[in-house]
Image: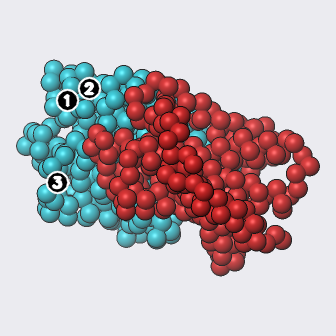
Chain colours: A red, B cyan
Amino acid sequence: MIYIENILLCLIIPLGVSLIFLKGKVRRFLISFMCGMVACLFAAYIGGFIQDVSGLESEDVSVFLSPIIEEFLKFLPVLFYFYLFEPKDDDLMLMAIGIGVGFATFENSSYILASGAYSIKYILIRGAAVGVMHLTSMVVFAAGINYFKKYGGFSLAGIMGALTLAMSVHALYNLLVSTKNVVSYIGYCLPLVIVLWLYFSYANSKGIFIKKDYVSKGDDLI
Amino acid sequence: MSILLIYDIVLSTIEAFVLIYVIWRSYKMVMASGSVWVLFFLASMIGLLLSDLYYITYSFIDPVTRMPFAFDEIAEFSMLLLLAAGFESINGSKKKINIPILIFSVVYLAVHIAAWIAWSGEWIQDIVFGIPYIYLFYLLITGIIRTEAFSKREITAFLILSVITFIVAAGEILGEGYIFLISSRGVSVASIIMEFGLLYKVIKTLKEPSTKYRSLYVTVLFFLMTLLDIYITEGVVYIFNNLFLVISPAVMYLAVKKELSQSDIY
């Protein structure tokens, strides 16, 4: 057993203190990163609670229920930010990336503490597969919101459709990697394939994703 | 593995290949045109592909145990919602609710949902998953009436077949013995007449020179009715419906391509 709250405190305090010295977009990114970590903590709590209440095995919860819980908790802060602050496209994308990366980082930290970091293979899988998957689902979601807001078609059906689509990708990944044979490697490759697809789409698209010169301005750094 | 499961896996695999082609072509269309509708269509077809892949994977991993949580249905849920969002983008400002059509959609889908519950016993799941079916069906019927995609005679025929399906499906759910048998055959006959009728209409609409969204509404209705009929039919009709389901993504893609080439969608 690991004390997940303590790990969160340990990681989040220096990040929180660093906010004093930052401003603008970098500060917003760091806040969203911390939101992602907190979302991961809540996901762990809810998963544990459902496991106790339903009597399901822990593997069943992680394969079949965690996609719903995790994706939902990642999307909530993005939607909150979108509706409350009406951000620009780039700001929304930055927020979504921060939440995805924060979630993945905290999840990876907790797993490594629980299972150890001795196997480089296991570490690479955690980093390149699960970690990347949390990021990609948020990038797609934010890109979708930006696109629909810009060109029409933004609606509850669209939001719910995007959310359940992300859950489905996550669920397929979980199912594939839950096997103990060659099929699991297809699962490990799935997030990277999606990232490559997104990258090429980004390279060919006109403004659906974050603008290329956005992070290189440097005007908001301390 | 049972014969029926092997058959389902084979057809899902063929459908997955059809979907990969449709997704690839739609992706190229989105990148070239930036069309919102095509983007929704692309996302919904990805949802359908995920549903097929999940079903195939799970069937190989554990062909005996029923899924604890049906993610193939969640992917279908996503696909229906994204198609509905696409039609919302077409409707634009015409968002006034048409109460009679809404009631018709709810009642017509209620019997299907009841049939799912009777088969699976999963009350909450089946009702929740029924909501996007009702919404998409409602959007399609309002769109078909607004764009005059169906003539008055076709609408009458559709209504009569819907009512017959409603009655015989209710008989199938509630009846026993002889009544169940007759109702079951009735569902199959009504379903196959409806499917062939819609297929004829799809071909006719795709051949029309200018359709103003009509081909989108008709092809998606064909797809939706096929999806619904699969769950309430069996035997030869079930096989036919599965074959229709395999071709329906390609048919929808042809409609999207046709509308985009006419600059009807943006």
Answer yes or no: is residue A48 visible. yes
Mark 3 to mark 2: distance in Å? 23 Å
Depicted A24 relative to depicted B122: above or below: above
Q: Position of residue B38 (x, y in %)?
A: 34, 33
The residue that disc 2 covers is B260
Which residue is at the front of the view, B171 or B200?
B200
Chain letter of mark 1 equals B
Q: Residue B19, how many percent across, how many down?
A: 48, 32
Q: Is residue A13 above or below residue B227?
A: below
Answer yes or no: do the residues labelled 3 and 2 have beta carbons within 8 Å? no
Helix, strand, or loop for circle 2?
A: helix
Pointer 1 with pointer 3, Cβ within 8 A: no
Residue at 38% x, 47% y is A88
Q: Position of residue B46 (x, y in %)?
A: 48, 39
Numbered label attached to residue B264: 1
Outermost residue toward the left in this view: B152
Give A46 or A77, whichever is nearer the viewer: A77
| Amino acid type shown at disc 3 | Lys
Label 1 packing within 10 angstroms: few (<14), some (14-19), many (20+): some
Q: Which mark is residue B95?
A: 3
User: Is label 2 on the same chain as label 1?
Assistant: yes
